[in-house]
Amino acid sequence: MRFMVLLKANEDTEAGVMPDEKLLTDMGEYNEELVKAGVMLAGEGLQPSSKVARVKFSGSKRTVTDGPFTEAKELIAGFWLFEVKSKEEAIEWVKRCPNPMKGEAEIEIRQVFEATDFGEALTPELREQEERLRAQAARKN
């Protein structure tokens, strides 16, 4: 099972406040633990919403809105992609994370859809295409 682990933004992350050396060290050790355990597939911090663009879809129309966006608690400051056996295991790994913010922080854990979740709508041809694209993307990394 794969889970997207989302670190919610706050006023500091939206202001572009960078973590100090201690937090970078602590997070580096945590990420190293995740990698050694075979849990972490990816993980990155994200720039503040002042550097963001959103694209809204309405039928065939596309509308682009540039940041910043005001609701920091609705924004994402960083993410990990975990591969674990259960949601409970993902929760246990997140509970081991050093507090990524000064004061309070919130991390959301969301399961990623797998091919089998789409049932018959994912035809053999679409499944083959998905597998081919994943393999091509993996080679580029």
Image (tube, helix red, strand yellow):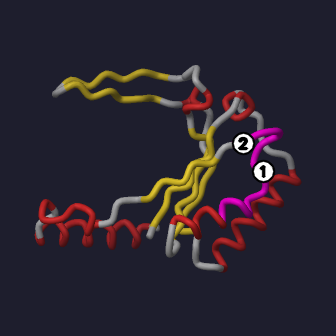
Residue 99 drawn in magenta: yes
Magenta extent: 93-105
| Residue 32 shown in magenta | no
Residue 105 position in % (x across, y down):
72, 42
What secondary structure characterizes most of the magenta part? loop
Above or below, comparing residue 140 to residue 56 in the picture: below
Q: Are discs 2 and 1 less than 8 Å apart at CB? A: yes
Give the residue at mark 2.
Answer: 105
Q: Which residue is mark 1?
A: 99
Is 8 on the left or on the right of 102, as rendered?
Answer: left
Disc 2 secondary structure class: loop
Instruction: Give the quadrant of residue 114.
Output: bottom left
- Residue 85: image location, x then y, percent: 50, 75
| Residue 61 vs residue 94, the one in the foreground | 94
Image point (66%, 79%), residue name: 36
N-term-proximal mark, 2 vs 1: 1
Quadrant in the picture for the N terminus: bottom left
